[in-house]
Amino acid sequence: MPKWLKIVLIVLGVMIFLCGVSGLGAWSWYGANKDKLKGVSERAKKEGAAFAFNHDDEACLDEALRRLSARSGIIDQAEHKLFLKACLEKAARSPGFCTSVPPRSEIMAFAQWAVERCAAKGKTGDQDCSRLMQSVQEACQSGS
């Protein structure tokens, strides 16, 4: 067997091993934290619905962005998206809120819209904000 092939196989074997260890670590972490994650999810949905009771959709977005500014870890971002989704489902729809939101099929148009919408909210260049805008798109597309 040529030396270069041995090197390639060793590198490939190490990569497969590392992927397996990473996968087992992620599975273990999820198993240890799934109840906490479920609690966070339920709490975010309840808070979103409660906030929507006396606020409109624009206020829901502003509150989700405020929360995102305070805490922006990966789990926090998921929590804020769930809050915003629940809030937008229950909140009163303000005129023009969904007017310029591109459909899901227009990925590049949505990305540009999200960047512009975040900039209008004072979050220029904030990728976390752009990801949060997916909840706005989903709410506007579902018609809720």
Image (spheres, rainbow, N blue to C red):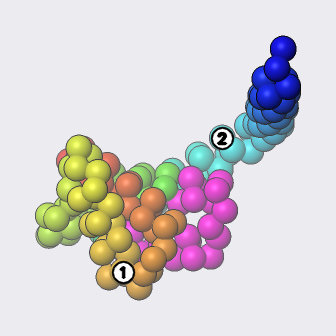
In the image, which residues are magenta?
59-80
Q: Label 2 crowding class (10 Å Cα cut-off): few <14, some 14-19, many 20+? A: few
Chief SS of the magenta region:
helix
Q: Residue furthest front?
A: 2
Look at 32% across and 82% down and name the residue there: 120
* Residue 27: image location, x then y, percent: 77, 31
Residue in the foreground of this view, choosing between 109 and 101 = 109
Residues at marks 1 and 2, CA–CA distance in whole angstroms: 32 Å
Would you name the residue on which mark 2 appears?
Answer: 38
Q: In which quarter of the image is residue 101?
A: bottom left
Residue 52 appears in the picture as rendered: no
Callout 1 touching callout 2 (CB < 8 Å)? no
Q: Quadrant of the N terminus?
A: top right
**Residue 139 in the image, given as x and y percentages of width and height:** 30, 51
The answer to whether residue 105 is above or below residue 21 is below
Q: Where residue 48 sits: x, y (%)?
A: 47, 58
Q: Can residue 2 be seen in this view?
A: yes
Is residue 66 found left or right of 12 in the rendered image? left
Mark 1: give few (<14), some (14-19) or many (20+) Cα within 10 Å: some
Write down the residue under mark 1.
Answer: 119
User: Does the stretch in magenta take in 64?
Assistant: yes
Question: With 38 as the anchor, is 141 left or right in this view?
Answer: left
The residue at the point 62 percent across, 76 percent down is 70
99 lies left or right of 137: left
Query: Is 9 covered by the magenta stretch?
Result: no
Label 1 is placed on what type of residue? Ala
Viewer-nearest of labels 1 and 2?
1
- Residue 76 location, quadrant: bottom right
Amino acid under disc 2: Lys
| Residue at 35%, 71% in the rendered image | 115
Q: Which residue is drawn at 16% across and 65% down?
A: 100
Provide the secondary structure element on which disc 1 rests.
helix
